[in-house]
Image (cartoon, rainbow, N blue to C red):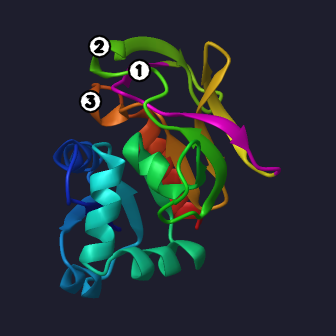
Amino acid sequence: MQVAVLALQGAFLEHRQKLSALEISSFEIRKEDDLKKPFDALILPGGESTVQGKLLRELNLLEPLRKRICKGLPVMGTCAGLILLAEHIENEPNSHFATLPVTVSRNAYGRQLGSFYTEDSFAHCNTIPMTFIRAPYVTKAGQDVSVLAKVDERIVAVRWKNQLGISFHPELTNNLTAHNYFISMIKTA
């Protein structure tokens, strides 16, 4: 199994470290030529969604990756990655991949000072640590979207078909639950 991690900006290295801890091979996507390497899944890390979206377009990565996601490539988007996947972004006219039938609110918990840590259940599993940094949350989920986690009644993790969208940063904790969940998605794809 080989997982590609978008490495244009954000917490991509931490995702690769989680994959390594799970003995999963990974590599970084930085340019169009990187798409020639074979991969079974994709991780879109946290960071700045506007910057990542701009770079995806400038580097001719957006449409090729979008096509693969639409064809069933398993993808996990965390924080900014969730925003990149969302069909709709509140108060913004444009979206990016627009493959996940949700509406998100960017920086919904406020600026950097609004960042926080909590623990809550994820995907009907035990309670896991959740680190939110200028995080979005899902304000509206499409009909067949499964809600995997809520914090204070706000949707912070969803799954739809081959796509996993998470508001928080599972890569910034010592817990492997979210990454294990994603690996199970890849295995059943």
Q: Position of residue 70 (x, y in %)?
A: 59, 75
Query: Left of 38 or right of it: where is 88?
Result: right
Q: Position of residue 83 (x, y in %)?
A: 47, 48
The residue pinned by badge 1 equals 110
Label 1 sits on a secondary structure element that is: loop
**Residue 172 marker:** 3
Q: Residues within 10 Å of mark 1 (few under 14, many from 20)?
A: few
Q: Are marks 1 and 2 in contact (CB under 8 Å)?
A: yes
Return the disc, 3 or 2, that comes first in the chain's sequence. 2
The residue pinned by badge 2 equals 113
Q: Is residue 51 above or below residue 170?
A: below
Does the magenta portion include 133? Answer: yes
Does the magenta portion include 10? Answer: no
| Mark 1 vs mark 2, CA separation in Å | 7 Å
Residue type at mark 1 is Gly
Instruction: Please state, as top left, top right, bottom left or bottom right, where the C terminus lies in the image.
Output: bottom right
Residue type at mark 3 is Leu
Q: Residues within 10 Å of mark 2 (few under 14, many from 20)?
A: few
Q: Main secondary structure of the magenta part?
A: strand
Report the residue at 44% width, 43% height from top: 180
| Mark 1 vs mark 3, CA separation in Å | 19 Å
Report the residue at 58% width, 79% height from top: 71
Question: Which stretch is magenta?
Answer: 128-143
Query: Left of 167 or right of it: where is 23?
Result: left
Q: Position of residue 176 (x, y in %)?
A: 37, 34
Q: Is residue 124 above or below residue 17?
A: above
